[in-house]
Amino acid sequence: LRESDVLRGVAGAAPSNGLSVLEQRLGANIPILVLGLPSSLEDGEVDNGGGCFYTCDLSTARLLPIYNTKLLRSYAELAPQLPALAVAIKRWAKKHGLAKTWDRFISSYSWTLMAVYYLQVCHGLPSLHLLARQSQEGLQSSEQECPLGTYDVTFSDAEEARKLLEAAGAAGAEESFSTATLEQLFRGFFSFYAEGFDWEDEVVSVRLGSRARLKGPEFSPELWKVTHKRGGRVVGVEESRPFLSIEDPIEVQRNLNFAITDKTA
């Protein structure tokens, strides 16, 4: 069965199991089914139609999202204020129609990565990828280059990160946020991206956890190149429009700005 056929079957069975089908993106490169579980207004998310749901993006036959989920959970455990900050930012983005790749904007996942990157650059949240490398290779400098490849699934979990930070004599991330309120972090997020971030040359890289140029050696050239194929053959390569580059920390050759157009940029 094709992925789209499997998801179409799930969509048909969802209503009888108490789930609402919010979106069906079955024709996308990665077919996605968006399901909603009804909830109360106090603790649920509000969709564009006015209903309240816990939402879930469902795909099939893909294992990499497991690593994405594990990575974000580890950051949330290391930085307790991250979940509330990410929810506030995503609700703002959804309210203004800026959180759907289907509408040629960035995804909810990308907004979360932007929140993590802001905390890394402005509040000292460490890179879990870099901590894992330092642990495995005995590196002492955060300036060491990270290896390039198609995927990077090696990163520390929150417990290991705390032990490594303690061994290095660094304070845990949660301590650095003890005096920062959610309002301060929320305002700081928008201030950083409005005034401190270079939208054309900087990369939102949670993997690095520090600022770097788009065409620097830390990144795959695939982040800034567009490959045109015809019949499975490469027929041309050109530079992409440099605007809000967001590196997927797991699929490191994937730029999550792929849906943005000149009109929506």
Image (cartoon, rainbow, N blue to C red):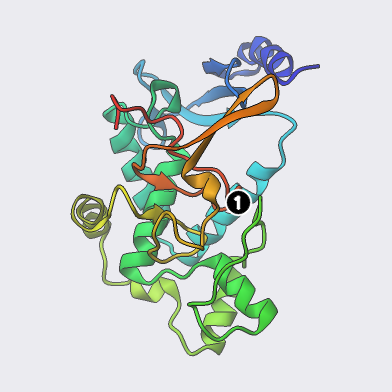
Q: Quadrant of the N terminus?
A: top right
- Vertical placement of 13 versus 79: above or below? above
Residue 198 lies left or right of residue 175; in this view the side is left
Across and down, in percent, residue 208 comes to: 49, 64
Residue at position x 46%, y 34% from top? 258
- Vertical placement of 159 versus 184: above or below? below
- Vertical placement of 85 versus 78: above or below? above
Which residue is identified by label 1?
A: 250
Residue most toward the right? 1
Residue 64 lies left or right of residue 195; in this view the side is right
**Along the viewing direction, whichever of 44 and 203 lies nearer the viewer:** 203
**Along the viewing direction, whichever of 1 and 239 lies nearer the viewer:** 239
| Secondary structure found at label 1 | loop
Across and down, in percent, residue 179 comes to: 26, 71
Residue most toward the front? 235
Number of callouts: 1
Residue at position x 75%, y 31% from top? 61
Across and down, in percent, residue 147 comes to: 62, 65
Q: Quadrant of the C terminus?
A: top left
Residue most toward the top? 12
The amino acid sitting under disc 1 is Ile
**Along the viewing direction, whichever of 156 and 78 lies nearer the viewer:** 156
Residue 195 lies left or right of residue 214; in this view the side is left
Across and down, in percent, residue 210 comes to: 41, 66
Hey, which quadrant is residue 202 in on the image? bottom left
Mark 1: few/some/many CA within 10 Å (<14, 14-19, 20+): many
